[in-house]
Image (tube, grey):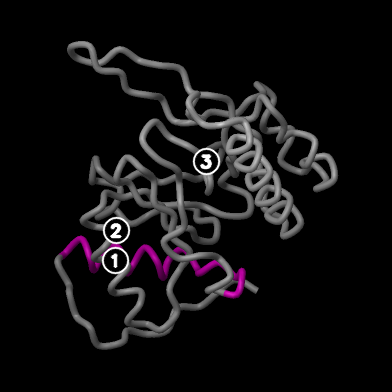
Amino acid sequence: MLDANWPDSWRGAFRIEMRAEAIGLAWRGWPVLPGAEPAALTADGDDLTWRRPVPAQDNWRELTETHPHEVATWFGDDTHSLLVATGTVLDAIEVDDELGKAAARLLRATGHPAPIVAMPNGRWLFLTTVATSIPRELADQASIQWHGANGYIPLPPSPFQHGVVHWRVKPEVWGWQLPEATDVHDVLVRALAGDQAVAPVASLSTAA
């Protein structure tokens, strides 16, 4: 959530940055969505946790093919996060911090790192092309979540309760070409199995 203690100028600059990011992604064909402020949840004791950002409109699936010019109008004073729908242009595999770091090391060994998003809750998102399934080794892990059809994920600079979503590896490093899902899945399976080999593996392929 946007900190109520931030000066108006900071909040304004933050929303301008979010709107610019949304427009840029929309021009590249990514199905961006405006996100609403998450509702508070009462946790054990007096602490509060926060739901993840959710779409601001109930009909968000109908908005995924909106022209970038219209996307710009979504990100005003009432917009609190930037989302992208999964399952049509891209998918994402969500993992914990430990597996994320291990997989990132293996991906760097290929010389072609995949786009990676880090969230303030310690979770990582590896962006890929759309997949029809994920390996059983990944699907069987409760700590791993596949964001595919009818899903969405937050993108930078969406705010959480204790920080903002940020890029670990920006899409431009990958030339804005998403890596094939099966290649990233294979690397995640290797990392899950404890493979720490630093020798380059077969280069990842990308979607045309």
SS type, badge 1: helix
Distance from disc 3 to disc 2, alpha carbons, whole Å, reads 20 Å
Question: Label 1 belongs to which residue?
Answer: 103
Distance from disc 1 to disc 2, alpha carbons, whole Å, reads 5 Å
Q: Mark 1 belongs to which amino acid?
A: Ala
Q: Residues within 10 Å of mark 2 (few under 14, many from 20)?
A: many
Is residue 109 depicted above or below 168 in this figure?
below
Q: Which residue occupies the foreground of this view, 119 or 103?
A: 119
Q: Mark 2 belongs to which amino acid?
A: Gly
**Identity of the residue drawn at 25% across and 43% down:** 143
Residue 156 is one of the magenta-drawn residues: no
Dominant secondary structure of the magenta stretch?
helix
Determine the residue located farthest toward the left in the rendered image.
Answer: 194
Q: Is residue 162 left or right of residue 83?
A: left
Q: Position of residue 119 (x, y in %)?
A: 39, 45
Q: Position of residue 49 (x, y in %)?
A: 32, 23
SS type, badge 3: loop
Is residue 57 depicted above or below 18 in this figure?
above
The mark closer to the camera, 3 or 2, is 3
Question: Label 2 belongs to which residue?
Answer: 100
Q: Position of residue 74 (x, y in %)?
A: 74, 33
Q: Mark 3 belongs to which amino acid?
A: Ser
User: Which range of residues does the magenta coloring cover?
Assistant: 175-193
**Identity of the residue drawn at 46% across and 58% down:** 167
Distance from disc 1 to disc 3, alpha carbons, whole Å, reads 24 Å
Residue 187 is one of the magenta-drawn residues: yes
Label whose residue precedes the other's in the sequence (1 or 3): 1
**Picture quadrant where residue 65 is located:** top right
**Identity of the residue drawn at 45% across and 46% down:** 165
Q: Residues within 10 Å of mark 1 (few under 14, many from 20)?
A: many
Question: Label 3 belongs to which residue?
Answer: 158
